[in-house]
Image (cartoon, grey):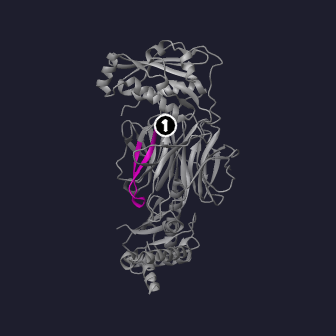
Amino acid sequence: MKKSRIRNIDQGAIMKLNKILKNTLLIVFACFALSACATSKKTTGQMQGDVYTGTDTVEYLASGVPDRVFFATNESVLTTASRETLRKQAAYLRKNSKITIVLEGHADERGTREYNLALGERRANAAKDYLMTYGISSNRISVLSYGKERPVDSGSNPLAWSKNRRSVTVKAN
Amino acid sequence: MKILIKIIILLILLPSKSFGLIEVDITRGNLDPLPIAVSPLSIDENSRQNFEKILKKRNIGDEISEIIEINLKTSGLFNPLNKDAFLQAPDIANLKPRFEDWNLIKAQALITGKVSFIDEKLRVEFRLWDVLAGKEMVALAFTTVPTNWRRVGHIITDKVYQRLTGEKGYFDTRIIYVAEEGPKTKRIKKLAIMDQDGANNKYLTLGNELVLTPRFNPTSQMVTYLSYFRNLPRVYLLDIETGMQEVVGDFPGMTFAPRFSPDGKKIIMSFAKDGNSEIYTMDLENRIVEKITNHPSIDTSPSFSPDGKFICFNSDRSGYQQIYVMKSDGSNVKRISFGKGLYGTPVWSPRGDLIAFTKLHKGKFYIGVMRTDGSGERLLTENFYQEAPSWSPNGRVLIFYRETKTDDKGEGFSAKLWSIDLTGYNERMVKTPTDASDPSWSSLLSN
């Protein structure tokens, strides 16, 4: 009984926590279980190395076409998963030839502002280059670096930083 | 804004011939700040009433001496003594201090002065005395418009600092910075400017677009900064007196990391294209653009040496962020940072002998200084996050910004300005009305 409740919480139904568990002892127990789950998630569930592999922040250009790719610390190399995402984006953009896009490159907060502006530009260009090799013309793509100015996750921890190291493809028209 | 309001030095009353008097050693840190008595500037009743009408301050003499006192205390080099212990009345002390009285309360230096209202103007005279030697060290008088009273306090502090330390002061200066508000994911940023002591804070932009990294022209009231106006990140030039602004250069992409050359005639900055950032200069008179670096790595955060002959900058051409120095034409590129960790934001000291930087090592951020060949690295302060040091015009103090870690919910973020003495002592938060980052220190406004 307890176990099923905790799994439920783990899946995101944290709001229900107080309603379900009125007993203080049970709440304390649940907190322990939660924090244990949270830490194990950080290292395995949503990151590979320090590249974010989760879907919490991802939006979609169209069904099955994720809008963003993630990077390792200080890196602008595209991972296997990122290349797959970008191939899906390229296929979508080939089908919808009137759409133009902005690639917005971002860095995490653990770097100096000016270097991060350059790094964001480099990341967005890595995505641009890959889209171009899959047939998307450079005049449909513009690049904009935000450096560390627009994090999606305001946390100060490795998981939050991994979500923020990203290049996001945004429709411009 | 009336910035360059002229302060006329009316008469110089005997810049006294004194040798072997007190000196403050500024190379040692503040272990033993000099005890100094700042006697309130005396004022006659008629002048007091006139200034009260104009400035809404009950006693302008007290106000000016308080500015001097706070400046001296903030420098970390002086210990202004409690006024309650003063035995001599301000007006009499200014004529002829009874040195035994001041010696009794352990004052080694004494500031006295007088404020008067003459022809609608503020006239201030002040004297600096060596208590032990019983001698006058400095005597000056200024006349200016009454609204300039805060600057008079700063200028007096500069004169006192210079006489006692042998180096120019940094009190009659301003700081330009980025004021920040709102949640971390949707931060609103505005350019703001204030006096060095936090007074006269003003916002120069409205917050409609993202603005970053403002930097003063060392020779005028111009500022260069990065703005995301119309979502096009470009380097801009802003005249703070007129509010006029313009884009710097005609680059087909993002320009960022701007700074002025020491003569104020060029802007040096990065231009990013196709994943590669290079350093360029643009001459503000003839608009000629020159490419300085040529390397497929990130080259950014350039800063000129004060003689204009060299440039230090940040590059990851070795694989990671490091500090490099080159001649101003881009030749002779040499890496100078070789310690453990990553290095960024190099800034050349106005004295020419040091480069200040930000360093990241094992998850901690440091502000430090090294000689211009990379030797003698000294870390001044360690924290969770801090960066972007800017030098006081005399090269003795650094101002930078520091950010706090957020809690488990991603809340509790703040960014503040801090200053620290070159010796690593006297670390202080610089108060701002909102959160703040990217500070840049102006040159001395007077002299």
Q: In the rendered view, would you say B98 is above or below B69?
A: above
> In screen coordinates, is A79 left or right of A17?
right
Image quadrant holding the N terminus of chain B, namely top left
Q: Is residue A63 above or below residue B306?
A: below
Q: Which residue is mark 1?
A: B442
Quarter location, residue B114:
top left
Magenta segment, which residues? B174-192
Tell me what residue is drawn at x 53 percent, y 78 percent: A45
Taking depth in this image into account, of B200 and A94 the one nearest to the observer is B200
At label 1, the amino acid type is Ser
Image location (x, y in percent) of residue A40 = 55, 76
Q: Quadrant of residue B411?
A: bottom left
- Secondary structure, magenta segment, majority class: strand
- Quadrant position of residue B7: top left
Q: Residue at x 40, y 44 (%)?
A: B192
Where residue A130 sits: x, y (%)?
52, 72
- Subunit of mark 1? B
- As displayed, is residue B162 above or below residue B189? above
